[in-house]
Each structure stands twice: as C-alpha cells, then as structure tokens.
Amino acid sequence: MQIVHYPHPILRYRSAAVRRVDAELRTIVAEMFELMYEDKGVGLAANQVNLPLRLFVANPAGDRDEGEELVFINPVISRPRGSLESEEGCLSLPGIYADVTRPASVHVHAYDLDGNEIDDDVDGFLARIVQHETDHLSGTMFFDRLPEAARLSVEPALQDSDIVFRQRRTEGGIPDDAQLQSDWAEWIARYGQPASDPIA
Ligand code: CO
C-alpha cells in the first residue's frame, strides 16, 4: 500500500459507501495510519491509498504516541457554521500549501470500525481535517476550493505533479485506467456499495 499522488484518477473518484468491515479492512486501516504518520499527516482518505471506499483516518496530533486515532466510515457533513481561512496541505500533493476558507464548525455523522455511530459537532483543527478528508471521498481536492488568484499560484506545482505522474505511468509504476477500474470494482464488490455517479 502506498499513498497516490495527484493527478492519480482515484483522487477524482466518488468513493463507494462501506457496507461491511472485516479483519482485512481493519488491517488496511491500521496501515493507513502508519502511512499517514510516516508522511507527517493528520488525516488520510481511503482513496489516497487507491481504495475506492468512503472512509478516512485522522489523528489531529499527527503522532502515533499522542492524540486519538479516529476512523470515520461513510461520513456525512451538515450544519456548516462560520467561516475560517487556514493553511492546508495534502499527502497526495507533497510540498504544496495554500490558505483554504471553510466553515469553522460542522456536524459530522459517521460510523467507527466497530459500527458505533459518530454524531458530533466538530470545530477547530478537527473540523478542518474532517472537511478536507470528506472532500477527498467526493473527488474534491483542497485546491478546488481556492479563489482564482490562489488557484493560479499553485498551478505550476500542479503541472509539475502532472509531469511526474505521467512519467511514472510511462515507466509502468502506475496501472492504466482499465486496470485501475478493474481493481476498484473488486474492492467495491467486497466492501462497498457503488456510488450512483462514480465520477466526481
Ligand atoms: Co488530502
């Protein structure tokens, strides 16, 4: 398992709802936490490891020995309140940061790995993470939320990332679209419920 970088196609995919959790999925989630810590992240969505399922992991402390490890399955965000600008980055776009304006607090409904319901109002850094990661599951990247001028300022970096991606694909490091679609279909057959409109 590895973190995929923009513009890997799964980053624009609308992930499938999770309908069951088994030992293998728990192992995958544990590996997602490890990859997140290795890359000094605070959140990681399943599609960032090429898994087309609606779940993400988070630990606002960004350290396996601190904070709390949170798993959000099938998250739904509602009740946005306020507005806050804050710098964001993304493990699928290393080295690129920009100020993103989002609601300051939101309500999130989800389930944890044991099927317990999460029904919380979140604010502060956790609200930021929950919104960034839930966006991933709908195929939205943080730079999609930038105003035009800021979007243009990250454009050269996005183009660089695009060149690296194409090069890696040419060298055989990344499967072609047909192979990816077939891999995703297998995961969805095992754990998911297909989205009615899979392309964001
Ligand atoms: Co991200």
Image (cartoon, rainbow, N blue to C red):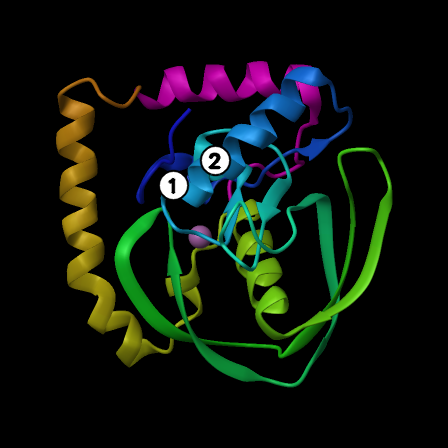
Give the structural element (helix, strand or loop) at label 1: helix
**Can see residue 45?**
yes
Q: Position of residue 127 (x, y in %)?
A: 63, 68
Q: Which residue is mark 2?
A: 34
* Three-letter residue code for mark 2: Glu
Along the viewing direction, whichever of 138 and 117 lies nearer the viewer: 117
Relative height, residue 22 to residue 161 (above, below): above
Give the structural element (helix, strand or loop) at label 2: helix
Relative height, residue 21 to residue 40 (above, below): above
Relative height, residue 13 to residue 126 (above, below): above
| Mark 1 residue's CB less than 8 Å from ligand 1 | no
Along the viewing direction, whichever of 136 and 68 lies nearer the viewer: 68
The residue located at (57%, 70%) in the rendering is: 125
Is residue 82 found left or right of 114 in the rendered image? Answer: left
Q: Position of residue 46 (x, y in %)?
A: 54, 36
The residue located at (15%, 61%) in the rendering is: 156
Q: Which mark is residue 14?
A: none
**191 within the magenta span:** yes
**167 within the magenta span:** no
Marks 1 and 2 in Cβ contact (< 8 Å) = yes
- Kindly report the distance in space between the C-alpha atoms of the residues bearing marks 1 and 2: 6 Å
| Quadrant of the image occupied by residue 196 | top right
Is residue 10 found left or right of 19 in the rendered image? Answer: left
The residue located at (36%, 45%) in the rendering is: 39
| Quadrant of the image occupied by residue 176 | top left
Q: Which residue is mark 1?
A: 38
Write down the region rendered in magenta: 176-200
The residue located at (14%, 23%) in the rendering is: 170
Q: Position of residue 56 (x, y in %)?
A: 60, 43
Q: Residue lying furthest front in this view? A: 65
* Three-letter residue code for mark 1: Glu
Q: Quadrant of the N terminus?
A: top left
